[in-house]
Image: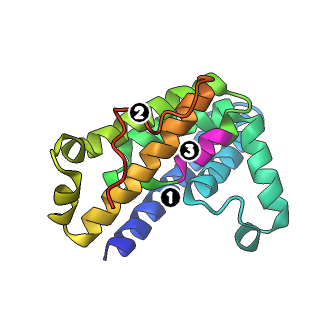
């Protein structure tokens, strides 16, 4: 059931990206709308984890898509900033860190801003876990689907914290006191 919910939420988010792209085509002058629409599509594929999977998107898109995000980081980061606040909690385990690694090539400051916001959203969702005196007991008390969600969010938090450190030019922070290690 949780897998179905994640698939439905992903479909909702990706549909939102596409709907936003269609709406933007009438509001932007010149060729910008086409570029934004293309960027939205590549952002959606990157978030789903399929952008660089040759068997899924084909060899041309697997090369062109990441390159487009590297070259249009500012537009892609703006799309993420506009869409991310509306994501339900289960959508927070999308491939945001990898997407921001791509956009950082041309918009390092924007990628850092989005990464910090994303980290704060994950921290909000993991507040009960972080406050629990015993992480193992806390997880054991959760239903399996919730336990798996917490574990995925913990991995996403480590990934985004690593990226934040890289974007700031600092060493890996995934072992910092504010990042509780994964339970067994």
* Observer able to see residue 138: yes
Whichever of labels 1 and 2 marks the residue nearer the N terminus, that label is 1
Give 94 or 139, whichever is nearer the viewer.
Answer: 139
Q: Is residue 96 magenta?
A: yes
Q: What residue is rendered at 40% in x and 62% in y?
A: 9
Residue with the mark numbered 2: 176
Mark 1 Cα shell of 10 Å, populated few (<14), some (14-19), many (≥20): few
Indicate the quadrant containing the N terminus: top left, top right, bottom left or bottom right: bottom left
The answer for how far apart the CA atoms under marks 3 and 1 are is: 21 Å
Q: Quadrant of residue 26?
A: top right
Q: Which segment is the magenta one?
A: 95-101
Indicate the quadrant containing the C terminus: top left, top right, bottom left or bottom right: bottom left
Residue with the mark numbered 3: 97
Q: Are marks 3 and 1 in contact (CB under 8 Å)?
A: no
Mark 3 Cα shell of 10 Å, populated few (<14), some (14-19), many (≥20): many
Q: Is residue 103 above or below residue 8?
A: above
> Going by the image, does 29 lie left or right of 140?
right
The x and y percentages for residue 121 are 35, 39
Dot 1 lies on which element?
A: helix
| Residue at the limit of the structure toward the bottom, as seen here | 1
Q: Is residue 70 magenta?
A: no
Q: What residue is rendered at 56% in x and 59% in y?
A: 48
Residue with the mark numbered 1: 15
Q: Is residue 18 above or below residue 86?
A: below
Q: Quadrant of residue 102?
A: top right
Dot 2 lies on which element?
A: loop
> Going by the image, does 83 lie left or right of 165?
left
Q: Are marks 1 and 2 in contact (CB under 8 Å)?
A: no
């Amino acid at each position: 059931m949780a897998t179905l919910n994640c698939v439905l939420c992903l479909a909702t988010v990706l549909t939102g990206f596409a709907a936003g792209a269609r709406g933007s085509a009438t509001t932007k002058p010149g060729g910008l709308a086409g570029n934004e629409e293309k960027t939205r599509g590549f952002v959606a594929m990157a978030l789903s984890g399929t952008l660089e999977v040759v068997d899924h998107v084909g060899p041309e898109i697997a090369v062109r898509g990441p390159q487009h995000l590297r070259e249009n980081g500012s537009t892609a980061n703006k799309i993420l900033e506009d869409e991310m606040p509306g994501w339900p909690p289960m959508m927070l385990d999308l491939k945001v860190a990898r997407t921001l690694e791509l956009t950082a090539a041309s918009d390092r400051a924007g990628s850092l801003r989005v990464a910090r916001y994303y980290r704060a959203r994950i921290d909000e969702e993991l507040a009960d876990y972080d406050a629990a005196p015993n992480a193992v007991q806390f997880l054991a008390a959760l239903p399996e689907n919730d336990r798996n969600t917490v574990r995925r969010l913990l991995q996403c938090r480590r990934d985004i914290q690593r990226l934040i450190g890289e974007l700031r030019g600092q060493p890996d922070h995934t072992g910092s006191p504010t990042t509780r290690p994964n339970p067994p």
